[in-house]
Amino acid sequence: MNVENFYSENIKNALKNDPPGEWMPNIPGNCIRLSSGFPAPDLVPVDELKEAVVQLLKQEKDLPLHYLGTPKMDKLKEQIQARLSDRGMRVADKALLVTAGACQAIDLIARVFVDEQTVVAVEAPTYMEALEVFQNYTSQFISIPIDEQGLQTKELERVLAERKEQGLPLPKIVYTIPTFQNPTGTTMTAERRKHILELASQYDFLILEDDAYGELYFDKPPVTLKAMDHENRVLHVGSLSKVVAPGLRIGWVAATEEIITSLYWFKKDLDHPFAQAIMATYLGNNNFDNRLNTLRISYQERFEALLAALKKYMPKSVTWYVPEGGYFVWIKVAGVDTSRLLQQAQDQGVSFLPGKYFFLNEQDGKEWLRLSFSYSDKKEITKGIERLGEVINK
């Protein structure tokens, strides 16, 4: 039996792409992990989460372990709404959907809005897992470059005008990470944020705003696209993975009630009631603003250690973007294929992510690499950059 004969056409097309997670390097145990885009072990609130689990089961017994879950799930929704409100986003109860992480939110949006005829505009470079999700539904993409001020909205405008003049289909969705972008760490300027909203109105598209890093700023918090949106064109996706713990898989979508109803139609009961109840209990027990301040200070210190090491150990041919928050620094190693460089670096005890994985056209990322300062401590970061510099200087 050939099982492929039973696959739907969209699955057949999706399976032509690289397998999910193909970009993840096989990291030797002795490596300093400048590739890891998740919180450092010492910054995960293990004791507080343990306390939340014990308290939850003591108060609610087996209730969180059943299909229907617990009232704590509604409490979590209220807590997310309150945080969004603090950031200028007034989101009604029926306009918010809690998801199993940001990736489920992106996948639900793709299921509802994207098919093989749909054009999706993405940043170049962009978050590779979102790219994997969209490639499961369509092969029609527009790549818009990023510079140090984020998505180049004038280039987006030029491409839209050109496609309209030529009678080509316009994008239905523009996917952007406007704040502390993955992988570049850049932040879209206020002027460009205003411009992309104007383009959405003029050319009639939706904006999927991925805001996974939005609260991890070093200085001032940028205003979200959702907070600036007056036409309900922005679908705001967020997550607690980067600020609490990724394994709990807590994310959300904030949109219109009509859109949320459509997303819920496909999500159904694919929740994790226990994880949501744990998170609600944890948030209720702890001052989350204090935690965010701790994270901001720690990540800024780690970034500053990385920046100092780059200046000390990298040759002048190596350049980088300077982020104002988030997890990542985007580096260009002129004339070097960073995919080949990776093995040499890991042999020297340091790991990174090659830039090719963040582009539709992998050649566009040949000379680039992403470094993370979220996982390793300051001493490890400095040592890792020293090792990487030695490899590049050979």
Image (spheres, rainbow, N blue to C red):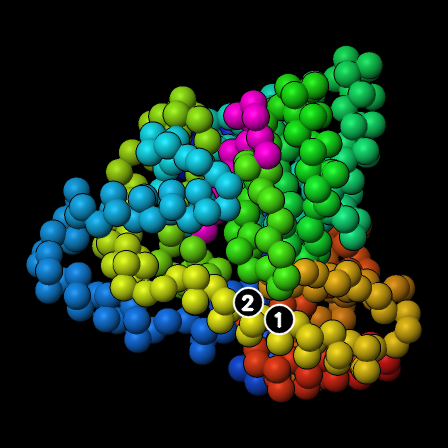
Foreground pick, 134 / 292? 292
- Does the magenta-highlighted stretch encompass residue 93? no
Q: Which residues are magenta?
A: 228-239
Residue at image point 77% right, 13% down = 167
What kind of element bears circle 2? helix
Quick one: quadrant of the C terminus?
A: bottom right
Foreground pick, 217 / 355? 217
Question: Mark 2 highlights which residue?
Answer: 296
Foreground pick, 42 / 89? 89
Q: Amino acid at mark 1?
A: Gln
- For label 2, the crowd category at 10 Å Cα-Cα, with few meaning under 14, some 14 to 19 and many 20 or more, is many
What percent of the width, then of the height, locates residue 313? 81, 82
Q: Amino acid at mark 2?
A: Arg
The part of the image, by quadrant, that contains residue 225 is top right
Question: Mark 1 highlights which residue?
Answer: 300
What percent of the width, then of the height, locates residue 316? 91, 73
Numbered-mark total:
2
- Does the magenta-highlighted stretch encompass residue 230? yes
What kind of element bears circle 1? helix
Foreground pick, 11 / 175? 175
- Confirm or deny contact between disc 1 and disc 2 (CB under 8 A): yes
Residue at image point 58% right, 42% down = 224
The part of the image, by quadrant, that contains residue 190 is top right
Figure check: 33 above or below 89: below
Residue at image point 90% right, 69% down = 317
Q: Is residue 92 left or right of residue 171?
A: left
